[in-house]
Image (cartoon, rainbow, N blue to C red):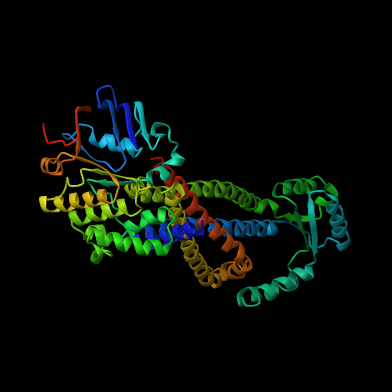
Amino acid sequence: MFTNFKRIFKFGWASFSRDGSLVAANIFIMVMTILLVSSLFLFKDISRFLISSFQEKADISVYFKSDTPELDILNLKEEISKIPEAKSVEYVSKEEALQEFTERHKDDPVLMESLEEVGGNPLLASLNIKAFEADQYQAISNFLDESPSYKNLIEKVDYYQRKSIIENIFSITSAFNKVGIGLSLILVMVAILVVFNTIRLAIINYREEIKIQRLVGASSWFIRGPFLVQGTISGIFSALICLLIFTLICWFFSPKLEILLTEPNLWSYFTASFWIIVLIQFATGIGLGVISSAIASRKYLKI
Amino acid sequence: MISFQKVTKTYSPQAIALENISFEIKPKEFVLIAGKSGAGKTTLLKLLLVEEKPTQGRIFFNGEDLSKVKTQRLPELRQKIGAVFQDYKLLPSKTAYENVAYVMEVIGATEEEIARDVDEVLEIVELKDKADNFPTQLSGGERQRVAIARALIHRPEVILADEPTGNLDPYHTLDIIRLLLKIHEFGTTVILATHDKETINSLEKRVITLENGKIVRDERKGRFIF
């Protein structure tokens, strides 16, 4: 039993090392597939993060007339907090708004000069309201419209100005999710078919050899075993290549992406999920190699 | 040892390869199966190797009905038979040594047994110096000698040789026939399918002559008659 296993492994390794071009073609296809599968994994988490950060950024700002007493604003804040759709309500006083403005634009001399020229504090106090879900902003906006006592205090609600942007972000992200899942499924299916077909073509090449092995009395497992070993070795090699490519990509692009997005840091995300990525890549590689070899070799073993 | 009982093999109603064939082969016999191309010689050997199953009739090998053998049993059965083919059927990705050793590995022989026997058999077929050559690096005669070495390495009860000299010149043909005779002297049953007049006439062995899938002659010391 052990001798047979040793021999099957020896034959598998021999055909792996002798069939250079076929093995290279197989590994190439497998590397593509594994890269695709692991990118989907990474992409899924990054897109989830991006979507939640977009959602975080979406809000309604209600600006009050400059003579509105702070107490009235705080009363309205209290009432808005009671709306079930409102996740949070934040009060920004005129002074805070000015402080934030000067802090943000301190490096812009033109703006700062204009501010000085205007004199005093031209900014308005505001309430920043966040909802739990994108489609709940309309309800909050309706509430503001339907409260006549407060309506007089309000200078403007920037929801209407940003409404299309907010709705766009949400429609894009939800479409992105749907298309992403559909596209990933199609790509994975295509990749599996390509790998299977490449291995099948390789095994068709061995058709005569398999027939000869059968005729000299080799059992099915004695013939199929080396193909499975070869598939496994190809899978391991492909996974190692992918891991290297993936590490380099994350390491190289992480600082560049940081300019665009402060979070998430690609490299720290990669290192945190390293073992899951390793698992995904090796499972995909070995799985593809073994399953495709097993199915493809079955056909020719019926002699 | 081998018994064909009213065996018919048809591929389609028009293509009848063998028709109502009956004969017996005793242990340690040397039997020639003669006939023109298409007479049914190869089909007959394929039935013995269970590459094909008969359409009608029964074939017995050591008392076992070959038409009822299950696929799982085939390896064990084929290990009792050594086969030599006109197109050699060597494994192209293995060297001469590995091709011969493969059969020993299949039957589960130890590394020591393999090293000892393969060397000995390659010595018999005079190919020890070409042990590390791949089939493409060998001549037709050398390839056929590797095939014979592979067929006899595990000391099978019977050797089937299907036109083993079909692709060879007269000089190499003689070599191969001498080898088969030597194997027969060791006590192995040999069934040799051929259409070579010289071979049939020179051997003076039992000849079963096939014509259009039927046995037309079965003579103890047969001659080439067409």
Q: In which quarter of the image is residue B63?
A: top left
Q: Can residue A46 be seen in this view?
A: yes
Viewer-side residue, B213 vs A10:
B213
Viewer-side residue, B166 vs B160:
B160
The residue lying at 23 percent from left, 32 percent from top is: B40
Q: Can residue A115 be seen in this view?
A: no
Left or right: where A59 falls relative to A294: right
Q: Position of residue B125 (x, y in %)?
A: 23, 58
Left or right: where B216 falls relative to A286: left
Task: Judge whether B53 appears above or below B20 on screen.
Answer: below
Q: Looking at this rendering, what residue extends furthest in the top direction? A: B13
Viewer-side residue, B30 vs A4:
B30
Locate the C terminus of chain A and report the quarter of the image it occupies: top left
The residue lying at 38 percent from left, 59 percent from top is: A15
Q: In which quarter of the image is residue B190?
A: top left
Q: Where is residue A216 in the image (x, y as percent from the top left)?
A: 35, 48
Q: Where is residue B51 in the image (x, y as percent from the top left)?
A: 34, 38
The residue lying at 79 percent from left, 71 percent from top is: A95
The residue lying at 74 percent from left, 71 percent from top is: A98
Viewer-side residue, A98 vs B21:
B21
Q: Quadrant of residue B30?
A: top left
Q: Where is residue A102 in the image (x, y as percent from the top left)?
A: 70, 74
Q: How many marks?
A: 0
Task: Judge whether B52 appears above or below A260 on screen.
Answer: above
